Amino acid sequence: MNKFKELANLIFPDITETIDDLEKRYPERNLEEGAMVTRFAPSPTGFLHTGSLFAATISHKLANQSGGVFYIRLEDTDQKREIAGSGKSLVDQLIKFGVTPSEGYFGDDEQRGAYAPYVQSERANIYKVIIKHMIENDMVYPCFCSAESLTKMREEQSARKENFGYYGKYAKCSTLTPEEGMERIKNGEPYVLRFRSKGHYENKIVVTDAIRGVIEIAQNDQHIVVLKSDGLPTYHFAHLVDDHFMRTTHVTRGEEWLPSLPVHIELFEAMNWKKPTYAHLPVIMKLDNGNRRKLSKRKDMEAAVSYFLELGYPKDGFMEYLYTIANSNFEAWRDENPKASRDEFKMSFDKMSLDGALFDLAKIQNLCKEKLGHMSTKEITEASSTWAKEYDEELYALINRDPKYYSEILSIEREKENPRKDYEKFSDIKPLILFFFDDHYKQMVDSALVYPEHLNKEDIKLVLETYKESFPEGLSEEDWFSVMKEVAVKCGFAATPKEFKKNKEAFKGHVGDVAAVLRLVVTLRAQSPNLYFVMNILGKERTIARIDYAISKLA
Ligand code: GLU
């Protein structure tokens, strides 16, 4: 038998499958021309980064709009760095934003799709089939270098100002014969498996990136480890095998992977497999004191998607924002199609920026305010209840005391041409509506009744008593406001700010002051949802009780 085959059999005596078997088990996908197969391939090492959601959103959209497939693969080959449960929570968070894969890893006990398993640690035998083939063909060899000898090698490279790594003359074990390899394995020496690179860093390769166009980079010359001593592959090798056998057409990933591209290209070429199209997405940047810098896990709360989920930013507003930074023509499209679903927008690589997408929290906040303002009462009631169920027990309990009442509160000035935009996120709702609940009102009232300084006690009392006397009921908003003006005039205030300005001496203030006093008494806030509707929802009895209490406090 050929010595390389012998070596391969010695290392993998139990691997009997062949690459052909795998080609049959994971055939080309039967998709229309132009359909993209994309993936999101997180490592379960922590939280979902906003940049990852950005990348996944783009991959998902590209697959969907082309009639392709978007799937999730869990890259858990670095088991030392794994954080239990984080794989599942990454997927759950993506799904909360509507980035739902059509196949792949959904949770620790759940995988769906014909290209399974989608968890790398469950694919060990698949990798071994390819590695065995590569050993047989002298593309992979065992390396016995110890950690100490590798450290020594680095020191030598540093002293000589040479490139770091296992390459060229430094790739000591690349010169071992298969016989020598077999002997040392039989002697029980520990080893890893390395890829025999044929590249040289002084040579260049030319690759076309779907976003960056033609790029020239140095060839790979590193004899990278393909299989670690724990029997699992390294990221580079798993990428080769998985994206080939899962039939990925487009690898969309962060630009931090660009330096690894030469390794990936060499691996695909060594196997003579069709390379996927690579698209290295811009990283998300942030303006910090006028300087652009990467959104950072350590410094920025908004780097974690959970920040937006916990505060209850509506997914629609957030997604709208991600589209805005993904494609430079999205905002113009939105202006022309204000009501259209984002599904109708065509995302493209050539409209992606190259110099980093700038993340602007204020813009997200505005978009979310718009989205919440334009939701129907039913939509916002449901969406905020779903949010409260997970993130705010107290609000959830309030909603469930009387869901109809809650819905009525949220209906104030909604479903109209220019809706009021009181909320930017679901967590804004509770503080703004707490006064609607009598028990909470009572708790807050004594400390909250702080009247504007320019009004005196007697006048405040007079305003409250006069309003109470003529308590308007069943009026339109317009007629109600006329009553407010009448109350103002009766109490010595001007009916309009304009009148007041003309002759300040003649008045105690104007109708705005009257409204401010009533607003404070009824809602305990200087700003509240429209007072007319607030009083209608509270009803006469409860409103008068609040006014009476305030009067008693002024005595
Ligand atoms: N597992 C890699 C990561 O955590 C995926 C990179 C890729 O998409 O190829 O970012």
Image (spheres, rainbow, N blue to C red):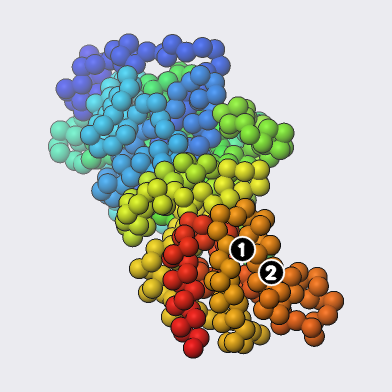
Q: Is mark 1 within 8 Å of ligand 1?
A: no
* Image quadrant occupied by the N terminus: top left
In the rendering, at what x and y percent does residue 538 appear? 46, 60
Near-viewer residue (9 or 404): 404
Q: Residue placed farthest to the left in the image?
A: 187
How would you rate the neighbour count of disc 2 (Cα within 10 Å): few for under 14, some for 14-19, many for 20 or more?
A: some
Disc number placed over residue 486 in the picture, else none: 2
Mark 2 belongs to which amino acid?
Glu
Residue at image coords 78%, 76% = 500
Residue most toward the right? 502
Q: Marks 2 and 1, Cα distance to the nearest angstrom?
A: 52 Å
**Total residue callouts:** 2
Q: In percent of the image, x 28 and y 29: which residue is there?
A: 111
**Is residue 469 left or right of 401 when viewed as pictured?**
right
Which numbered dot is residue 371?
Answer: none
Q: Is residue 53 visible?
A: no
As drawn, the label of residue 288 is 1
Residue at x 40%, y 30% (from the top left corner): 101
In terms of image quadrants, where is residue 453?
bottom right
Can residue 541 be seen by looking at this rendering?
yes
Q: Are marks 2 and 1 in contact (CB under 8 Å)?
A: no
Tag 1: residue type? Asp
Q: Position of residue 393 (x, y in %)?
A: 32, 57
Q: Secondary structure at mark 1?
A: strand
